Amino acid sequence: MYLHEEMETLTRTEIEALQFERLLRTLRRCMKSPFYQKRFAEHHLSPSDIHSLDDLRKIPFTTKQDLRDNYPFGLAAVPMGEVVRLHSSSGTTGTPTVILHTQKDLDEWANAVARCLYMVGLRRGDVFQNSSGYGMFTGGLGFQYGAERLGMLTVPAAAGNTKRQIKFITDFGTTALHAIPSYASRLHEVMEEMGIDPMRDTKLRTLIIGAEPHSEEQRRKIEKMLGVKAYNSFGMSEMCGPGVAFECQEQNGMHIWEDYYIVEIVDPVTLAPVPEGEVGELVLTTINREAMPLLRYRTRDLTRILPGDCPCGRHHKRLDRMKGRSDDMMILKGVNIFPIQIETVLMQFEELGTEYLITLTNEEANDLMTVEVELKDFSDDYPRLQALTREITRQLKDEILLTPMVKLLPKGTLPKQEGKAVRVRDLRKTLI
């Protein structure tokens, strides 16, 4: 059964008891993996050393580099004859990472995604359109099988071809759409060009967004543009893909399914645990996977556990929206800056659209930042545009403690991407 209502209504005590039971089973399975056999031996550890969930900290972290170093099948915990699918990163900058799945792994993944979609109100009878890429990218097949498990009519539109996406939305009566935030904005832009009003001419009411960091302000702009309620989601291929954590209808943090994962938040430098409510690096341990379990996997994503209970009644912990990645941080003049900080400021201005580009350059020993952002509508009121530029610059300086150069551009000026938006261009040269 796709819903698993008994798992969603567990108390904290019941969740932690189930986690420990599944952790012990996972540790025994990891001893069949050549990588973990060696890792445990090097640290003089065995599964019998783990007596509580707190003892998880005895286990060393697993990193993306570990997956690359053991490419392709060094982390397999089952015979390869039991593996029915693999997913892989693109590997364009080096050795790709590979994730293996048994049939049970795929079934559990579909259950997790179906649980997420059910949580935001989707039901049999809805029409679900997926604008993710299929193939090695997990967003396509992950949402596809989850939506089918829920019993919805699915439209595997895949990525790109925006006018065709819109035709499918209108012709098939799409009620729910999965799209990355920047592409959702692009869809609205093309709808406007085609004379289509999404609130009048479509049945869209639910949007699933994720895969790239976005601010609450951008989410609200998208909701207003498309006339939908947009729910934030989190997934990554190392953890199967989509379905790791998802907002409920309260839209106040993403419930992470703790019957599938044990979550830790650590300081990305010291790797020590941080107090609940503080931002740090997300570390995940899989406890419901057969082919390739991962222990204490460093995701590099920065977030925090939201304290307190959710009004929806679920007791699974909630993650805040991703602030960014520890390796996406920009450092200018000794100041740590994340793109999401700049977006949060920009999206507060009604005059601005959703497309922006941050360019980093340097002159001699001086780092410079230019923020180009498109206007929502054309304007030749230069005094007003100058005043707007000054106010945006002021608010950005208050947020990031540096003064960027702000350029307001006509709508449609910046390059369009139908994949993840490119928000930062670092053109700085190393000075000798």
Image (spheres, rainbow, N blue to C red):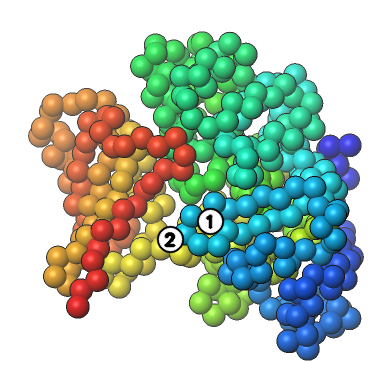
Q: Quadrant of residue 16?
A: bottom right
Element under label 1?
A: loop
Amino acid on which the number 2 mark rests in the picture: Asp
Residue 199 falls left or right of residue 52: left
Residue 232 position in % (x across, y down): 58, 42
Can you name the residue that lies furthest to the front here?
A: 81
Give the Cα separation between the discs numbered 1 and 2: 18 Å
Q: Residues within 10 Å of mark 1 (few under 14, many from 20)?
A: few
Answer whether residue 318 is visible to the viewer in this image: no
Residue at the spot 81% in from the left edge and 64% down from the top edge = 77
| Image quarter in which the N terminus is found | top right
Q: How many badges with numbers are in the image?
A: 2
Answer whether residue 128 is visible to the viewer in this image: yes
Q: Residues within 10 Å of mark 2 (few under 14, many from 20)?
A: some
- Closer-to-camera residue (78/176): 78
When the figure is inspected, residue 273 is found, relative to residue 90, above or below; the finding is below
**Residue corresponding to mark 2:** 328
Residue 168 position in % (x across, y down): 57, 17
Element under label 2?
A: loop
Residue at the spot 55% in from the left edge and 26% down from the top edge = 228
Can you name the residue that lies furthest to the bottom here?
A: 44
Counting residues from the start of the chain, the first of labels 1 and 2 encountered is: 1
Residue 265 falls left or right of residue 406: right
- Closer-to-camera residue (252/194): 194
Residue 67 position in % (x across, y down): 64, 66
**Residue corresponding to mark 1:** 91
